Image (tube, rainbow, N blue to C red):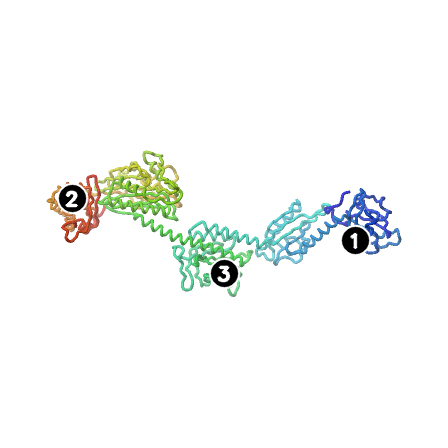
């Protein structure tokens, strides 16, 4: 036979429990259909027989037989014989019936069910009872209309929930949106039968909506054994603290991520305020010590207060940052926070003690507030203050204070990093600016203007450089260079190269010779440790090899300058030009650098044809010098590749655009400082692909009447003649006041040339903003100044020249050497 199971329902119910009537003598009088199904015996087969005949072993279990036993209800266990021959263990109950008057009158009702069904029923009953009896896990039963039938604990552990919930819907005491959220989930369970597991929702009461409580519940449908829908059962737990802990952890995570995005104190403060509002607070103010912005160490005053600046604010009605933050000790500022623990005001509307602190009530509608110091290395760098104003948010608590202190500690480290970076950045910028000449220069040979724009406006340092170097005989050297890479390393390399160029320029070599010496120097510079960095790979700048190939005969050829052994190669480009205002001739050479643009006085714009050599540091290939004649008023534009390579097209297109911009800026006639600004005006205001350097020079010439040249024989007698020539020329120029010094200088230089070098001897005087005297001879021996002893008859000539002039030196020429000396004029001539 089929044995009933627990799913068939509860035992001893009339629709699934076997029942029989027996008289006082234990004779079966009636047999239900359920009994027939249970034992597989028909009523006509068992009625009229003793009930003990149903036992599997009547003799052994007669004491347990469900026989009449007076007027008491008796329960027991028995093993019955099934109609199929098997055995069935049952639990039974014998209940006496009233009105039994004779032997055959019904006197007892026997109910029986399989023992395993009864055991499961008892377990289910005990489980349900214990669930409703405990208070750690909430249990609620809703009927099919989603009205509460029964619950073991209050739905919400704070005010606003009625003590008796029977017959109420959730919407009767919860906010409509919260009740609708839960009803939607329970309604789906009723419709589909699919349970809901681990659903978390916010529950707020109509009476007290203070942030509410987060409940995590699971729900399943309840049905009778016949399939009739009874309702839905819900288990729930209060996970508010876990949820808020997760929210705090998420705020801490977002704040930490935001703090790593900038080394600017302003940006760091703004990012922090944006993270905290509205996720954690309704209003936030970040005050940063003034010292942080200039990289210095904050120093408290004698009251322990640090001058602070309100750097960032967030929240409805927040004031604009930038104002001076209230000092500690002011009623509107938190007290000194040197102890690093911060302050918590739970009720900013209080009237006594810390609850009445002015800083906590400084924000209109503030309900609670927290203030924490922003410190690093026991130094206060600022203050973080938060307010909650919304009525539906809970007040700050101790856990919130712990979170704010943790955030403040990380902000303090970020501000300290920003302070240190600012200090180092200012030092780096000061270093680089000190390595570059003034933006404008006005001298006898040229008038110049320049502009430098770093690719990184925040870092502000890189490897581009320019220089205007005054040379002897009124000449000038114009230099532009580019060290591959960015940052302090490139700046340091640039400083070394610029110093080397100035040192070599003092020797007055030809441009190609200077680049050769400079290339040898670069080859000897130690490589920096690190991954191999091919030229052009740093900072988005095009490699100097590509620049050299782009403008040379081997266009498109790329030279490999990477060093071996995993050490970075050093690469740089340089253009060196020397302009002589006396002859109007410009000699220039390039080491992988693009050619300068030339605007002639008739308006023609072009580029000087050059055969650029390889970038500095490659070696092995010669540099070629180009010589061009420049008319007075011509404009030379020297630049770095960042100006012609903006990612807008190829180099040729960029050069064409530069030429057009120079023409539009009227570089021939407009002030040069305005010209350079107009040329770079179209560059993006944000980060550039590469550094941009532009040096513009407008040429001048020395009129023929301001020079005088003579050729002298190698005879000591011509020294007196030289003095006479100089005296007559000074009289023509109206410089008689310089006669004594000039005659002495010329006498010493001509005498040395005749004595040590022979002839012919060249003598030239140039009048510009200074008076230059030159003596040339065919010897290649470099003169050397020495200090003569008291008994020496000679050796004092160059010493006297050095003492009587402002500047002197010598330079090699193709015919020998030239020694020159300069004297300032009594009144400088106006330059044309």
Q: Position of residue 749 (x, y in %)?
A: 16, 46
Q: Which callout, 2 or 1, points to the residue nearer the camera?
A: 2
Q: CA distance from mark 3 to mark 2?
A: 88 Å
Q: Residue at x 38, y 52 (%)?
A: 424
Q: Position of residue 748 (x, y in %)?
A: 15, 48
Label whose residue precedes the other's in the sequence (3 or 2): 3
Q: Residue furthest left?
A: 717
- Residue 606 appears anywhere in the view: no
Residue corresponding to mark 3: 343
Determine the image quadrant of residue 380: bottom left
Residue corresponding to mark 1: 75
Q: Secondary structure at mark 1?
A: strand
Q: In this rendered view, identify the residue nearer to me: 818 or 371.
A: 818
Q: CA distance from mark 1 to mark 3?
A: 70 Å
Q: In this rendered view, identify the residue nearer to me: 784 or 314.
A: 784
Query: Considering the image in quadrants, where does the C terminus appear?
Result: top left
Q: Which callout, 3 or 2, points to the residue nearer the camera?
A: 2
Query: Considering the image in quadrants, where does the N terminus appear?
Result: top right
Label whose residue precedes the other's in the sequence (2 or 1): 1
Residue corresponding to mark 2: 756
| Left or right of residue 727, residue 143 in this image | right
């Amino acid at each position: 036979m089929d044995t009933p199971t627990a799913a068939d329902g509860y035992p001893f119910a009339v629709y699934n429990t076997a029942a029989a009537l027996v008289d006082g003598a234990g004779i079966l009088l009636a047999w239900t259909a359920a009994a027939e199904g249970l034992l597989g015996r028909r009523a006509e087969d068992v009625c009229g027989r003793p009930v003990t005949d149903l036992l599997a072993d009547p003799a052994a279990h007669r004491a347990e037989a469900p026989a009449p036993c007076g007027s008491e209800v008796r329960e027991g266990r028995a093993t019955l014989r099934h109609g199929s021959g098997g055995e069935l263990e049952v639990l039974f109950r014998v209940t006496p019936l009233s009105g039994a008057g004779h032997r055959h009158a019904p006197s007892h009702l026997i109910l029986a069910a399989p023992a395993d069904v009864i055991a499961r029923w008892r377990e289910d009953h005990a489980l349900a009872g214990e669930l409703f009896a405990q208070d750690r896990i909430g249990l609620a039963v809703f009927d099919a209309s989603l009205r509460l039938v029964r619950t073991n604990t209050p739905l919400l552990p704070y005010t606003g929930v009625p003590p008796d919930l029977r017959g109420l819907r959730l919407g009767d005491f919860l906010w409509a949106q919260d009740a609708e959220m839960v009803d939607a989930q329970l309604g789906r369970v009723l419709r589909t039968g699919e349970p809901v597991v681990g659903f978390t929702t916010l529950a707020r009461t109509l009476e007290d909506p203070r942030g509410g409580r987060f409940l995590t519940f699971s729900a399943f449908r309840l049905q009778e054994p016949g399939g009739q829908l009874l309702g839905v059962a819900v288990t729930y737990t209060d996970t508010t603290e876990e949820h808020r802990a997760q929210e705090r952890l998420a705020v801490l995570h977002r704040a930490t991520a935001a703090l790593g995005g900038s080394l600017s104190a302003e940006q760091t403060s703004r990012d922090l305020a944006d993270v905290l509002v509205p996720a954690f607070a309704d209003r936030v103010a970040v005050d940063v010590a003034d010292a942080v912005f200039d990289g210095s160490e904050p120093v408290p005053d004698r009251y322990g207060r640090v001058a602070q600046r309100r750097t960032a604010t967030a929240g409805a009605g927040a004031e604009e940052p930038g104002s001076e933050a209230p000092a500690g000790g002011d009623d509107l500022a938190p007290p000194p926070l040197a102890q690093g623990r911060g302050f918590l005001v739970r009720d900013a509307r209080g009237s006594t003690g810390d609850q009445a602190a002015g800083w906590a009530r400084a924000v209109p509608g503030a309900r609670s507030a927290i203030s924490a110091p922003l410190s690093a290395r026991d130094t206060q760098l600022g203050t973080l203050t938060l307010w909650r104003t919304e009525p539906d948010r809970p007040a700050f608590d101790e856990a919130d204070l712990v979170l704010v202190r943790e955030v403040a500690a990380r902000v303090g480290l970020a501000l300290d990093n920003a302070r240190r970076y600012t200090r180092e950045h200012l030092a780096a910028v000061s270093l680089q600016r000190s390595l570059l000449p003034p933006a404008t220069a006005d001298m006898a040979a040229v008038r110049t203007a320049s502009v430098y724009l770093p690719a990184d406006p925040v870092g502000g340092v890189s490897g581009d450089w320019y220089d205007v170097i005054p040379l002897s005989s009124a000449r000038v050297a114009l230099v532009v260079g580019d060290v591959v890479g960015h940052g302090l390393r490139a700046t340091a390399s640039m400083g070394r190269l610029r110093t080397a160029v100035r040192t070599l320029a003092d020797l007055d070599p030809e441009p190609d010779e200077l680049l050769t010496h400079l290339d040898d120097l670069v080859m000897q510079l130690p490589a920096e440790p690190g991954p191999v960095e091919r030229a052009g790979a740093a900072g988005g700048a095009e490699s100097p090899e590509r620049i050299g190939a782009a403008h040379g005969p081997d266009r498109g050829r790329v030279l490999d300058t990477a060093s071996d052994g995993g050490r970075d190669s050093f690469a740089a480009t340089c253009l060196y030009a020397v302009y002589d205002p006396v002859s109007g001739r410009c000699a220039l050479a390039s080491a992988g650098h693009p050619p300068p643009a030339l605007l002639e006085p008739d308006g023609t714009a072009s580029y000087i044809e050059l055969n650029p050599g390889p970038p500095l540091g490659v070696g092995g290939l010669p540099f070629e010098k180009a010589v061009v004649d420049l008319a007075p008023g011509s404009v030379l534009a020297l630049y770095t590749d960042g100006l012609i390579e903006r990612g807008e097209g190829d180099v040729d297109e960029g050069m064409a655009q530069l030429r057009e911009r120079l023409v539009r800026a009227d570089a021939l006639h407009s002030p040069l400082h305005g010209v350079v600004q107009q040329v770079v005006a179209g560059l993006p205001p944000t980060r550039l692909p590469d550094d941009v350097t532009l040096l513009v020079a407008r040429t001048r010439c020395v009129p023929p009447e301001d020079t005088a040249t003579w050729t002298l024989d190698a005879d000591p007698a011509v020294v007196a003649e030289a003095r006479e020539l100089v005296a007559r020329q000074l009289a023509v120029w109206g410089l008689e006041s310089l006669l004594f010094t000039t005659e002495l200088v010329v006498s010493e230089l001509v005498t040395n040339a005749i004595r040590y070098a022979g002839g012919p001897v060249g003598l030239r005087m140039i009048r510009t903003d200074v008076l230059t005297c030159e003596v040339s001879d065919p010897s290649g021996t470099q003169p050397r100044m020495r200090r003569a002893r008291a008994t020496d008859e000679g050796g004092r000539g160059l010493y006297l020249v050095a003492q009587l002039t402002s500047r002197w030196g010598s330079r090699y020429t193709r015919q020998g050497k030239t020694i020159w000396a300069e004297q300032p004029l009594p009144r400088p001539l106006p330059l044309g």
